[in-house]
Image: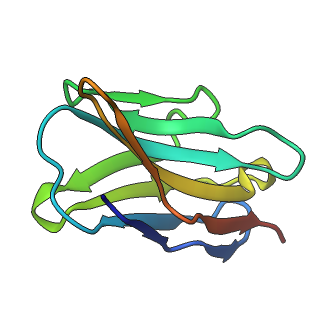
Amino acid sequence: QVQLVESGGGLVQPGGSLRLSCSASRSVFGINVMGWYRQAPGKERELVALFTTTGNTNYADSVKGRFIISRDNAKNTLYLQMNSLKPEDTAVYYCNLKIVQLVPEIYWGQGTQVTVSS
């Protein structure tokens, strides 16, 4: 089992920045995919950014050039730097881990609210 705990959400004005963190309860060895998703009220959960199994990054078109995903393996922590925030970025942001193996394991954090409003 792996517990994921997000932090760093809050209220920010349009154009502002926030950095989200996702701490994993233990190191995850092997092949895995780790990333950030978000869900706005009345909408489906959508991918924001992730690290692929090869360590490459994928971003949703709506956040390219504004958000940066990074990780610190020594701290078992994933980050999402969000810049130039827009009201449409308002959502609950979730950390996700998928351990790729014969029987995949998928974990979600509890989510952190990001509100972009003046």
Query: Image quadrant for the C terminus?
Result: bottom right
Q: Residue at x 82, y 67 (%)?
A: 117
- Is residue 64 left or right of 104 when viewed as pictured? right
Image coordinates for residue 103, horizontal then vertical, percent = 31, 29
- Is residue 3 left or right of 32 when viewed as pictured? right
Viewer-side residue, 67 vs 103? 103
Say if 81 sits above or below 21 in the image. above
Viewer-side residue, 107 vs 14? 107
Q: Residue at x 31, y 59 (%)?
A: 2
Q: Residue furthest front?
A: 103
Viewer-side residue, 65 vs 46? 46
Image coordinates for residue 29, horizontal then vertical, percent = 12, 45
Q: Residue at x 52, y 33 (%)?
A: 64
Q: Residue at x 56, y 66 (%)?
A: 110
Viewer-side residue, 36 vs 85? 36
Image coordinates for residue 69, horizontal then vertical, percent = 37, 46
